[in-house]
Amino acid sequence: MTRRRRAEFTDWQQSAIRELRAVAADFPNEFQLLDHPRLTDGGLVEARIRLRTGGLPRAPRGLPLREKEEFLLRIGASQLSPPVVEVDHGRFLGYPHVLQGRRLCIYLDSAREWDPRRGFASAIDRLHDWLADAAAARFNPEVALFHAVGGILHRTPGIPTIVIRESGMALTAQPAYLAVRSPHRHDLCYSDDHTGRHRTVVFQLADPLPLGAGSRLRGLLELLDTAVRPGAFGAWRPRAQSVPFLTALAAAAARNQEGTPQTFILAIPHPVGGPPHLLAGQVPATAADELRRLVRQRTTPVISIGAGEIDHQTPVEWCAVSDERDSVTTRRDANRPANAYQGKTIHVWGCGGLGSWIAEFIARAGAKRLILCDPGTVTGGLLVRQDFTEEDIGTAKAEALRKRLAAIRDDLEVEAHVGLVPGAIASILDADLVLDATVSRAIGQLLDDLAPMPGRPLLAQVATDARTSTLGLLTVSDRTNPSGPNTIDQRAGEKISADGELEAFHTFWRDLPPGDELIPTRGCSVPTFHGSAADTAAVAASLTSILGSYLASTEPVSGTHLIGLPHSPAEPFRHFVPAV
């Protein structure tokens, strides 16, 4: 009979233990290793440690530390796993960055904050600093991850994500609906304006769930009925929540088809107030069908179902929530120049190398409405550097780009015009910006003719160089300037062409020498500029940001911007020529 080989510590774990023992020997009054580290079934090494914390400054709402505190320190099998620190008491329950009252979140972003090159003992310094911040109440509970639900992410693999953009009413149980967008995305809404939507319920809880919400329905129901606060575990509420929640869940299930799971949304108060934290879950189809059976078999008009009627093994499958409510969301581009496009109406004339990318950047920046104009058709060669796909070949550029942008944002209004300009040119009066990316002399003249029009929008032109597409040109005519961007561009060209330090940009106002353009398909295409998607998109992105600053500004400024990418003939470069 062969003996089972005893599990051993890895080299990393042995090194970590040696470091802990060295710290305990060097600072015996501050740090103790209390027992022999042991290997757990999960391959982690667990060590009990003690830190002196009595000297840390305290604040009224800080972590309630004693003179000395004990912790369970868990060491992963390799340096890729950051240390895990837990406590085996409930005194820290409900405090920011304490997960389910037990685990201390000493690394909020371990990819950046855990550096194994500093040695494992650096985790003790990290823990000490974390305790100092917690005791002094320096953690902001308002931004602590998942603070209302024990600091943990509730998500079951393979369950759809719920997208939530609307805020509901302050009702204990509010009917709602889920629109199935795809197998992995459902959208929450409060109006049943489409058939086939899944009925759900948004249930408002009375208190946070500092221990989390569990993984089984019976466990969740018990948490709803139990006051979980530091020093008061297991105190029953004067008014239970499990019966009304279960009743609302069953009522929603009764309105959905047999054999389908039943979803619910919990609106959980945040410990510091403000909008509730939203947690979405579902019970499997078998459990949902049992709820439907209980509803059908009731003997009174009122639905009332208690926890005792639920199978102990019924699981809760947690859905990821993409919470996009304005009340809890800050745009990732806030305070950046592109944020100025938010809510604006923009014309983009020319959907090619620059225009297609600029249109997408503006769409992502939150524009309300985009009007796209281009007479061309997508061909295979354009995919090298324009914002199209194989499926778009043979489609009008403006229409192909419209479909792409509409797929990026549901709330974006996009019009496509297969032509150089919109059919009704007067529609530009409703716009905030008209951007010419056509490099058409006729379009430039048209913008000059529109410039003196009262109430007209900001007018702009963009271009890139033919040799490398690493240089960018942006000309802007402010709303009050009687000269259009074409005229401003020509005046700027005279000044720039006379400046030897700007020689790399002279190409924008000179006839192109042989070799600066290419013919992509022999006998079937007009000459065009050299350039990759990486280059044209980078130039387009820079020009989009610069142009955004004009939409945000209240100063009437017109002029021409020159930019060069780091690998351009001008190297990293930016220059502005004011309009005269």
Image (spheres, rainbow, N blue to C red):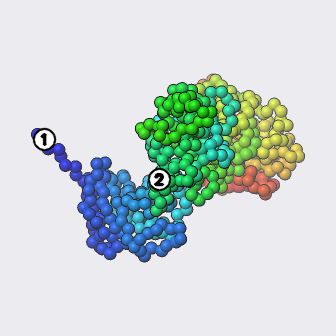
The N terminus lies in quadrant: top left
Confirm or deny contact between disc 2 and disc 1 (CB under 8 A).
no
In this view, 300 is above or below 549: above
Q: Residue at x 88, y 46 (%)?
A: 454
In the rendered image, is residue 496 in sight? Answer: no
Query: Residue 531 appears at what percent x and percent y?
Result: 59, 39
Q: Which one is nearer the viewer's eye here, 541 or 281?
A: 281
Label 2 CA crowd tier, 10 Å (few <14, some 14–19, many 20+): many
Query: Residue 491 appears at what percent x and percent y?
Result: 79, 50
Query: Residue 68 appears at what percent x and percent y?
Result: 37, 71
Q: Would you say 65 lies left or right of 451 here?
A: left
Q: Which one is nearer the viewer's eye here, 332 or 244?
A: 244
Location of mark 2 (residue)? 211
In this view, 471 is above or below 93: above
Q: Would you say 206 lies left or right of 436 here?
A: left
Instruction: Give me the disc on residue 2.
Output: 1
Q: What secondary structure is marked by label 1?
A: loop
- Total marks shown come to 2
In this view, 97 is above or below 177: below
Label 1 CA crowd tier, 10 Å (few <14, some 14–19, many 20+): few
Mark 2 or 1: in front is 2
